[in-house]
Image (cartoon, rainbow, N blue to C red):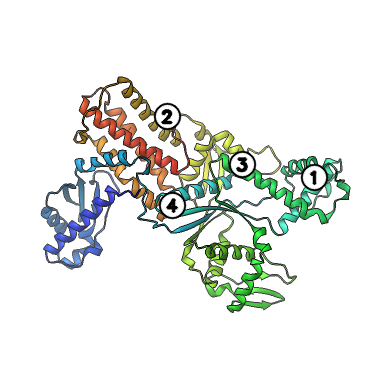
Amino acid sequence: MASYSRFGEAQAHIVQSLDTALRARGFDNLKSYIEVDRPTEDGHGDLVSNVALKVARFTKMAPLALASALAADWNDDAVVERVEAAGPGFLNFTLNTRWMAEVVHQVRAEGASYGRTTAAGHGDRILIEFVSANPVGPMVVVNGRAAAIGDSLARILNAAGFTAHREFYVNDGGNQILKLGHAILLRLQELQGRDVMSTWPDDVYPGEYVISVATAWRAEHPDIVIDDLDESSYELLGDYGAKKFQQQHEAVLRGFGVEFDRWYHERELRQALAPEAVIDRLDRLGFMETKDGARWFLSEKFGDDKNRVMVKSDGTMTYFVPDAAYHADKFDRGYHYVIDLLGPDHHGYVGRMRAVVKALGYPPDRLEILIVGLVRLMRGEELVRMSKRKGSYVPLEDLIEEAGVDQARYFFLERAPETPMDFDLDLAKLRDSKNPVYYIQYAGARIHGILRQWRDLGEPDVELDLAYLQSPHERQLLWLLARYPDVIVRAAMERAPQHLPRYLTELASAFHGFYREQRILEEARGVRQARLALIEAVLVVLGSGLDLLGISLPERM
């Protein structure tokens, strides 16, 4: 169900009225200069426009004089209650509270579909590839941040009218699988009592997490003699280990509320000879050259900082080739936009991937790459290393176990994806207003409690009159409810899920202020009914917004 926005309706109304007023004064063709937005500070109305500052040069009037004239010209209407000229030439608009209050009817009528729209995305298909952790070890904390961002972004995009799909790219091809197989073989030998650590190769994964995979393999293959295995077994053992780790990844992510539409395997690409096909395609287009026995992609032609080796002098392909083939496949599947979420060590990847996408003939602006910033776990000022295993990594499941799914997802989502963050474990476990997750969820629990008390009274409804909603706290809640559809669209269009946690914190704060200052059940029935309808609408939006973040809204806390 498409949802219109009263926030947007008010903006459009004011723009049109300002254009009419300017034309009445003989100033045509200035509509493109008219912008209406939220004020940056309280006390400047509900909406503000700097149009007088922008068009004063065309009118030969001082900006403040023009703003004052436009304010004086304003005709009373159902949307705008008051217009004031302020500062060097701003126009501040206060909206009619009764007009704003109609949003309560809309929210209650549309329920969970309120805020959803088809108007922004128009059904455009988007593929979001995220996490894509190598299947050679456990999921780590930064993978969890990518998981929360990618999953929430997909939910937001779908709510804004796009058709977003989630994909996990499994790097189960190439040399890393052989290295994993080598590590598993060494751990199998260790389980038989051999000292392998003193001669452990530098380029083989030393993590103790491989021991559990080796133990599982031995239990499943009791008839195989370990001493009969050699380097020819690396691929067999590596494939086994990769499948085990993928199963672990799926389980951890499912527990984190993340499901993928597809787990796409690099092995599929290699078996289809897609990497070779990409090299041939670039060669036919004239974008490959041979130098020093290697095959180079001329990526500098497409904005990269240097040309890239695709086939080394020994005839092996670099990792860039299957990645290029994978992106060609994404576009060939008919996606209008391709979004990659990459780790903080992948900045150098951006230029080369944009270059190859452009060289292959796909629109480079349809490839969007979001870098997910580093995460540090903290207790106060102390850096935390939670792993019980050898190494410095922190398994995602350890974080989830200690902090909880809701807290982890919220903390990962409240900042812009590229911003490095400190995850405060002590704060995540607090059950008071200092914890932003608890603060939002408690607003919902409070509303549920009020509604339960009202239902226990068993009194019949009276005709709903929203004109009773006039207090500053009520106006603030109405305005926030009206803005919700636009928050979703902005988060979707900017690929910025952090707008939603900020909005929900503002809505929860407004409700808690309303709760402290306004009686509800003790008021006369008409006032009570209006306020109950208002908080029901707030509850709907809190639940909807948290759902887009993959966070629950408990009825009791």
Badge 2 vs badge 1, beta-carbon distance below 8 Å: no
State the mark number for residue 157. 4
Amino acid type indicated by mark 2: Glu
Q: Is residue 349 above or below residue 93?
A: below
Sequence order check, earlier mark of 2 and 1: 1
**Distance of mark 2 from mark 1, alpha carbons?**
49 Å
Comparing labels 2 and 1, the label whose residue is closer to the camera: 2
State the mark number for residue 555. 2
User: How busy is the neighbourhood of tag 3: few (under 14 within 10 Å), some, or many (20 plus)?
Assistant: some
Q: Is residue 300 above or below residue 383?
A: below
Amino acid type indicated by mark 3: Ala
The residue lying at 63 percent from left, 64 percent from top is: 320
**Distance of mark 2 from mark 4, alpha carbons?**
27 Å
User: How busy is the neighbourhood of tag 2: few (under 14 within 10 Å), some, or many (20 plus)?
Assistant: some
Amino acid type indicated by mark 4: Leu
**Distance of mark 1 from mark 3, alpha carbons?**
24 Å
In-image side of 43 versus 546 (left or right): left
Q: Quadrant of the rendered structure where residue 234 is?
A: bottom right
**Distance of mark 4 from mark 1, alpha carbons?**
45 Å
**Distance of mark 3 from mark 4, alpha carbons?**
25 Å
Sequence order check, earlier mark of 1 and 3: 1
Mark 3, residue position: 251
Amino acid type indicated by mark 1: Arg
Sequence order check, earlier mark of 4 and 1: 4
Sequence order check, earlier mark of 2 and 3: 3
The x and y percentages for residue 325 are 60, 65
State the mark number for residue 187. 1
In-image side of 81 versus 289 (left or right): left
